[in-house]
Structures are given as C-alpha cells and as structure tokens.
Amino acid sequence: MRKKVFDVLPPKKLEKLEGRREETLRLKKRGLRISLPKIAFSKGILVIFLILIVVVLTAYFYLPKAEIEIWPETELKAFEVKLTVDKRAENINLISNLMPGIIFEEEKIITQEFSSTGKKLLEKKAEGIIRVFNDSQQEQILVAQTRFQPPLEKFRPSLEAGENPWFRTNERIVIPARGYKDVKAVADAPGEKYNIEPSTFSVPGLAGGPQYTFVYAKSFESMKDGLKKEVAVVTQEDLKEAEEALKQKAVREIKDAIAAKIPPEFIVLEKDIQTEILETFSSARAGAELEKFSFQVKTGAKVMSFKKEDLENFSKEFIISKIPADKKLDQKSLRLNYLPETINLEAGKISLSLNIEAKIYSDINEIALREGLSGKSSTETQFFLQNQPEIKQAQVKLWPFWVSKVPEKIERTKIRITVD
C-alpha cells in the first residue's frame, strides 16, 4: 500500500514551524545587539588612553615646582644716637637727626564739696517790741538796761538755776503820765527759751514802791531770734586741705584727659606731661557758718608727642645709612629704646637718647639664584646652596613627588628668605 503525501502540513506541525522561525529571527536580532557594545567599549578605552597621555604631559611640563627656603647668615648691629623732636620739623632729617613733633594742650575745671570741721557756739538773744504803760499821774523815767519780767510759765522749756527771766531796754525811757511808749526789749541771755509768746511784763526795779502797780509793759507779738546752739564752721585748715586735695586730683585728671585726647599712633611719656594750676576758688571763707563748702580748681596741661611710625622710620633709615650697600635690614628684628634727656615745651623741642638694635644680612639676588639652580637636581641644589658663604641653612622642596630636578622655567621656583 502506498503512503499518502500531504501538501499542506497539519495545524500542529505548522505552529511548531512558525515558532522556530520567530525564534531564529530573535536570535539574529540579539546577535546584532551584542556586537554594538563591543565596538563602543573599544572607542572608550582609546579616549581614556588619550586623556591620560594629555594629563601626564601636562603634569610633566606644568606641575613641577620648587620651593627653596633660605636662612641667611645674620649680624646684630647696635647704634646709639641723639635725636631731636622739633615741632617746627616737617619731615625726618638724617643729617640733623631731626624728627617732627606736635604739642597737645588741655584745660580742665574740677569742683568738689568738702565738709567743715570747725565748731562754733552760736548765741543770739531774743528781742521784740514792748509797750510800756504809765497809769500814774506823774511822768516816769526808766534808765537804760531797765529789767522787764514776764510770768515764769511763759518760758518753755523752763528756766534753770542761774537763768534770769528778764528782758532789758537799751535806752533811757521817759513815759508821760497816763501814757505809754513803744521800746525795743532784749532778753537777758541767749537761747530759744526766751522766744516767748505775747505777754505782760512787770518792772522788778520798781518793786516795793507805789509805781510798781502803775508802770508795766505788754508785748503784742512773740519775742524772736533767741538762739543757742553749736554750728559747723569753715576753718582755714579746711580750706588749705581742700585746695591741696583738689590740686592733686586735678593733676591726675588733666593727665588722663590729655592722654585720651592724643591719637593712638603718637607716643606720650607720662613724665613729659607738664601740668599747671591756673586758678583756685572757694565758695566760703574761713569762719563761715557752713556744714559744707565747695572748692574749685582750674588746671592746664601740655605735652609734646611724636609718631611711633616716624621714630621707627628714622631708626630704619639711620641703620640703612650706616651699613654696606650689599646688606639688608631685617625690619622685624628692629628694637628701640629711648629716653628723654631735655624737654623744652616753650621752644617745642625734646632731646632723646635713642638706642637701636637690628639684624642685617647679605642681599641675595633671587633672579640670579633661580637661573643658577635651573635644571639642577635636588642634591646639586643642596650642595650649591651649602657652599654659599652668605647662606647659613637652606631647605629644598620639589613637587610633585616624582620631580627630581629644579624646574627649567625660573618662574616655577619660589625662594623664601627667613631670618632667625
């Protein structure tokens, strides 16, 4: 029997065949995708390689640098010079040893209150006007210092033993018959007790006679101004002590005031400040009955000053003028000591004794040194520097770490001078 041949595949076999085709196409596509990253990766390596070459070349030619620190041989120099500070000088003058100065002036008034130490017993007799009556038929004459006596109960506090209850007239009195006369009466003794209220007065001198009942007096106002107490008094010693204390205070304050007035860039020696007491005044005189009094002092001060910068510049210029031209001054080592010898504020001059100390060293030509060290190895550079008589010590630093020679370009070499 013959087998049957089919031109059309069965559905199941056809599905398998189509699936195989699709898988084949997918694999082909995947193969394309895998080949592209391999090409990109190769180009990236090339770019990185080129960048590294540029970096290395740049580092080789542009990064190297040298830092050379040099400690030169130094010599300490000391000078002593007489320097004149003159208010008329405008600039530093090395030939005449002159330096400009300026005079500052200040005035100040200070006042202070002081306590009086003196004591004084202040006594005053009470007094007032009394009207003396004469009720008799005849004229009555009363001599000066006639006594008039009020009732004892009028005295408050009460009178003590030895105190008389009398008021007296200072003048002779003539009282007409059946008339009266107003007169001034003064207490027999000082004290507040005699400041009595209005009262009736008898005349003790007429006691025992017929006129005693006809002649009397009355006051219509209180007696006043009676006083007896201890009060403070200004003494001559008080005034003297106040003046001395205030003068000392004025001198201290005027010095502080003028020092505060001077700018900080000026030098002021406290002992150079000239002070003067211009005026003294007291609100009281000796004997014045005051518990406190005020005293006033007017003082003035003047001082001649100069700038610290001018003194330093003079010292630097003076040293430079005294050392060889191939030497340099180490300005940081400059030390000054000065003392005033004479001060004449009227002439506007101060004479100073000036001591100067500073280190000097040989001038190093940095450009020539860079050129001489260009391209030398670290060892050659150290050897060269150690054999220079003006150099005490040197330190060479090369950067980056792989650099072994001083750069050919002199601008890549930095030199720093350090003075001990």
Image: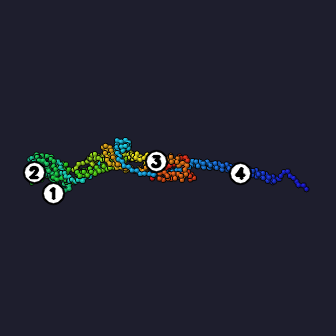
Q: Earlier in the sequence, mark 2 or mark 4?
A: 4
Q: Quadrant of residue 155?
A: bottom left
Q: CA distance from mark 1 to mark 4?
A: 146 Å
Q: CA distance from mark 3 to mark 4?
A: 73 Å
User: x, y (%) of residue 225?
Assistant: 20, 50
Q: Secondary structure at mark 1?
A: loop
Q: Which mark is residue 34?
A: 4
Q: Residues within 10 Å of mark 3 (few under 14, many from 20)?
A: few
- Type of residue at label 2? Gln
Residue annotated with mark 2: 211
Tell me, yes or no, whether the two marked residues, 2 and 3, touch with CB atoms within 8 Å.
no
Residue annotated with mark 3: 363
Q: Secondary structure at mark 3?
A: loop
User: x, y (%) of residue 257?
Assistant: 34, 47
For image coordinates 18% across by 51% down, the residue present is 125
Residue annotated with mark 1: 162
- Type of residue at label 4? Ile
Side of 323 where 154 appears, left or right = left
Mark nearest the camera among 2 and 4 is: 4
Q: Earlier in the sequence, mark 1 or mark 4?
A: 4
Confirm whether residue 371 shows in the render: yes
Q: CA distance from mark 2 to mark 1?
A: 28 Å
Q: Farthest residue toward the bottom?
A: 161
Q: Residues within 10 Å of mark 4 (few under 14, many from 20)?
A: few
- Type of residue at label 1? Gly
> Which quadrant is home to the N terminus?
bottom right
Q: CA distance from mark 2 to mark 3?
A: 129 Å
